[in-house]
Structures are given as C-alpha cells and as structure tokens.
Image (cartoon, helix red, strand yellow):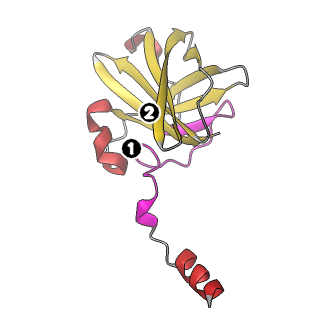
C-alpha cells in the first residue's frame, strides 16, 4: 500500500511548482561555442516569465576557473553588432543553501564580440546565473537557471 501511495504521488505530482525556466520564451537553439542559449528580454518585462518578448538570444560559456563568456545573437542566431551595447555589464550567481538564497555579483566587460568576466564560486548547486546588460539605454536580462 505504501508503494502504491508513493507511486501515485510521483505520477500525479503537480508540475506547477517547478521553476519557470528563466525569463522569456523557452529556446531550443544550440550554442555556437558549446554553451547554453537563453532568451534575452527587457529587464522591466522579466516578471512576465515565458510571455516576455524576446529581444535577443544569449549564449553562456563557462570554464572551470570561473571564466564566463556571454555571446549575443539575434533571433536567427546571427552574432549581434556589439557597438550598441555599453562596455560593462553585471552578472549575479545565486544558490539556495539551507533554505536561504545566497547571491554574489560580478562584472562583465565587453571584449571583441562577447562579454567576459570571472564568476565567483557558487555557494551551492544547482545555481542560477542572471546577466544584465545595457543596449541603447535599455536594461536587458538573460537568466540561466539550474546550473551545476
């Protein structure tokens, strides 16, 4: 009977409690540099979740030493002309540890056709990484969730 109850609870678990997978529409694009691709939305629209309007796409590439690169693309995955972006951006890495959300920020610098920075070690896993950039005075956000 206990096994039946456990199986039933797993089968009928409510998926509405799951995280919304970031901000903006869900994407299935493959990264050009082997990274993860996520939607870029206006930061002001972040609360809209998957209904936020797609502005650009971002690819996140990470190295084991914490080096983090962010490449920006248009809707068809063509690299963007980075001249319209401010030369610095911000990123924050956050994880839940013992029920408390711990967050660290770090700076991103525009270099050639990508942003680069050194990510601090996350306090726990999985962790979320939010990227905030400015393009022509508009704040943009790309969220990469459940990373390890």
Could you say whether the residue bearing mark 2 is in a helix, strand or loop?
strand
Question: Does the rendering let one see residue 70?
Answer: yes
Nearer the N terminus, badge 1 or badge 2?
Answer: 1
Q: Which residue is farthest bottom?
A: 1
* Residue 106 point in image, percent of width and height: 50, 16
Locate residue 105 relative to residue 141 in the image: left or right: right
Q: Which residue is mark 1?
A: 24
Density class for disc 2 (Cα within 10 Å; few <14, some 14-19, many ≥20) is many
Above or below: residue 85 compared with residue 23: above
Question: Which residue: 63% across, 24% down?
Answer: 121
Q: Quadrant of residue 4?
A: bottom right
Question: Which residue: 36% across, 35% down?
Answer: 41
What is the span of residues highlighted in magenta in the rendered image? 15-38
Q: Nearer the viewer, residue 121 or 146?
A: 121
Q: CA distance from mark 1 to mark 2?
A: 8 Å
Question: Does the rendering let one see residue 73?
Answer: no
* Residue 18 point in image, percent of width and height: 46, 58
Q: Which mark is residue 142?
A: 2
* Residue 84 point in image, percent of width and height: 38, 14
Locate residue 68 relative to residue 79 in the image: left or right: right
């Amino acid at each position: 009977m206990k096994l039946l109850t456990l199986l039933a609870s797993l089968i009928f678990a409510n998926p509405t409690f799951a995280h919304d997978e970031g901000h903006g529409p869900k994407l299935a694009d493959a990264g050009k540099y082997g990274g993860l691709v996520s939607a870029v939305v206006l930061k002001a629209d972040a609360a809209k979740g998957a209904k936020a309007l797609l502005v650009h796409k971002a690819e996140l590439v990470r190295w084991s030493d914490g080096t983090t690169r962010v490449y920006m693309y248009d809707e068809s995955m063509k690299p963007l002309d980075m001249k319209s972006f401010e030369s610095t951006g911000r990123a924050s890495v956050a994880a839940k540890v013992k029920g408390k959300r711990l967050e660290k920020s770090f700076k991103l610098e525009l270099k050639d056709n990508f942003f680069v920075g050194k990510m601090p070690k996350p306090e726990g896993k999985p962790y979320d990484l939010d990227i905030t950039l400015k393009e022509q005075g508009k704040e943009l956000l790309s969220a990469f969730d459940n990373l390890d």
